[in-house]
Image (cartoon, rainbow, N blue to C red):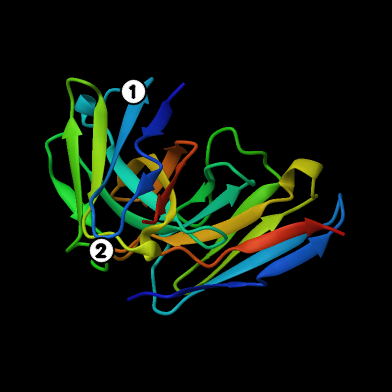
């Protein structure tokens, strides 16, 4: 099984900050990596697919990079609505495993 | 606008079968353009992809759940359903249905999700 490890597990930041979240796969997954945002009580929203492709309607302050085993999600300038939990997901295996999540909180 | 809505009983007894339905609007399951998935999230925990189905009835399951899970489709009602057999307290979770895109170049991802339904397994 492929394990997905996100870091950090939680993060405090301020509006306007640049934030980076990392996701590491236990084996190579090429570019088969997606990022989601989940607000409390809601279903996740797709942000990035295939490592760096911005889903339609997602603000350009979100960006993704990486390939192989190491990936990053960057938010260039945090907005109030960005405080949420972020998950990565691999789609290389038949399990489509998610990372454990990164909770982004207001400092 | 694509919308998905989960429905089903909120409480299931241990050892029984959990049954949920997802109703899709704004897209047609029978178009064959997408797969249709179930994902769950135990309270306060992370996400687990359970499986998906194609309009033809072809299914793909998470190997860790394959022995207890089945997904079916009713194209006439534009719905798909989930069954989990022999449930225990560990199956208590919010269950989400989602539209699943599969592309040979971009891989697979879920682009529209329902709001989720909390299912509690308890006697």
Of A9 and A34, the residue lying toward us? A9
- As drawn, the label of residue B16 is none
Label 1 neighbour load within 10 Å: few <14, some 14-19, many 20+: some
Residue behind mark 2: B65
Q: Residue at (20%, 60%) from the top-left corner?
A: B68
Q: Position of residue B58 (x, y in %)?
A: 13, 45
Q: Residue furthest front?
A: B123
Of A12 and B19, the residue lying toward us? B19
Circles 1 and 2, Cβ within 8 Å, touching? The answer is no
Q: Position of residue A15 (x, y in %)?
A: 86, 50
Describe residue B108's horizontal placement relative to residue A13 as left or right.
left
* Residue at disc 1, secondary structure: loop
Q: Position of residue B76 (x, y in %)?
A: 17, 20
Quadrant including the N terminus of chain A:
bottom left
Q: Position of residue A77 (x, y in %)?
A: 80, 50
Q: Is residue B16 above or below residue A27?
A: above
Residue behind mark 1: B27
Q: Earlier in the sequence, mark 1 or mark 2?
A: 1
* Same subunit: marks 1 and 2: yes
Q: Residue at (52%, 60%) from the top-left corner?
A: A88
Q: Is residue B106 visible?
A: no
């Amino acid at each position: 099984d492929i394990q997905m490890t996100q870091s950090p597990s939680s993060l405090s930041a301020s509006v306007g900050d640049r934030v980076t979240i990392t996701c590491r796969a236990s084996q190579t997954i090429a570019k088969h990596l997606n990022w989601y945002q989940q607000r409390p009580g809601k279903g996740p929203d797709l942000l990035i697919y295939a490592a760096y492709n911005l889903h339609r309607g997602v603000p350009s302050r979100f960006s993704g990079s990486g390939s192989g085993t190491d990936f990053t999600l960057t938010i260039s300038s945090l907005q109030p609505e960005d405080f949420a939990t972020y998950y990565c997901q691999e789609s290389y295996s038949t399990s489509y495993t998610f990372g454990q999540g990164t909770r982004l909180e207001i400092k | 606008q694509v919308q998905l809505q989960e429905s089903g009983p909120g409480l299931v007894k241990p050892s029984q079968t959990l049954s949920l339905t997802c109703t899709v609007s704004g897209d047609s399951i029978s178009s064959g353009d997408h797969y249709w998935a179930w994902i769950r999230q135990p309270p306060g925990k992370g996400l687990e992809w359970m499986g998906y189905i194609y309009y033809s009835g072809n299914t793909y399951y998470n190997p860790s759940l394959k022995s207890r899970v089945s997904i079916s489709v009713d194209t006439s009602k534009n719905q798909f359903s989930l069954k989990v057999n022999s449930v225990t307290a560990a199956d208590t979770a919010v269950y989400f249905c989602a539209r699943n895109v599969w592309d040979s170049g971009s891989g697979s991802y879920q682009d529209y999700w329902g709001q989720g339904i909390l299912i509690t397994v308890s006697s």
